[in-house]
Amino acid sequence: MRIPKSPLIAVLVGVSVAGIAGASAASLGGLTAGSLGSDDSVIASCDTDGITIGYTTAYDATNQEYRTSAVNFSGVNAACNGKAASVSLRNGTTALSTATSASITVTAGAFTLTLSSPITSESVDGVSLVISG
């Protein structure tokens, strides 16, 4: 059985072009024998059993609504004392207010972060706390 030359030539040309393209990419510096590495570290939490969150609120008679002025944290382990903390209050994915402290003082298992200005309590549907350092 005889194989027609046209398909055989097409296959050989295709393989040759692919080989040349690969060699060209390697010679352009796209493929190098660089180094690859990784590292990890253990991040220990200063409080592993959870923190209770509460709010300081007051009624605003002018606007006829409750306003939140601070976030109170209790059940905080003493190991968190002196660490930085940041709290964000949000409505869905919208940030309403954030309060931070470079060094929190944990007294009797509690600390408070005061907001820069009070916000409408009704609008808060989420809170995030980060303690670091």
Image (spheres, rainbow, N blue to C red):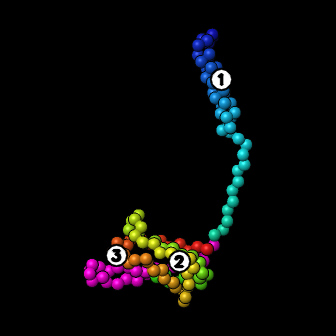
Asked if one can make out residue 80 in the rendered structure from this viewpoint, the answer is no
Q: Is residue 95 magenta?
A: no
Query: Where does the image place residue 13, in percent across and percent down from the top left?
Result: 62, 20
Q: For marks 2 and 3, give the one nearer the viewer.
A: 2
Label 3's element?
strand
Label 1's element?
helix
Pointer 1: what residue?
A: 16
Tell me how far mark 1 sits from mark 2, CA to CA: 65 Å
Q: Residue at x 38, y 78 (%)?
A: 118
Local packing at callout 2 (Cα closer than 10 Å; few below 14, some 14-19, many 20+) is some
Pointer 3: what residue?
A: 120
Q: Residue at x 61, y 23 (%)?
A: 14
**Amino acid at circle 1:** Ser
Q: Residue at x 61, y 74 (%)?
A: 133
Identify the image quadrant of residue 116: bottom left
Asked if one can make out residue 29 in the rendered structure from this viewpoint, the answer is yes
Residue 91, relative to residue 67: is it above or below? above
Tell me how far mark 1 sits from mark 3, CA to CA: 70 Å
Query: Where does the image place residue 8, in percent across and percent down from the top left?
Result: 62, 16
Tell me which numbered mark, 2 or 3, is placed earlier along the sequence: 2
Magenta stretch bounds: 44-71
Q: Is residue 69 magenta?
A: yes
Contact? badges 1 and 2 (CB < 8 Å):
no
Question: What label does residue 101 carry, if any?
Answer: 2
Contact? badges 2 and 3 (CB < 8 Å):
no
Identify the image quadrant of residue 48: bottom right
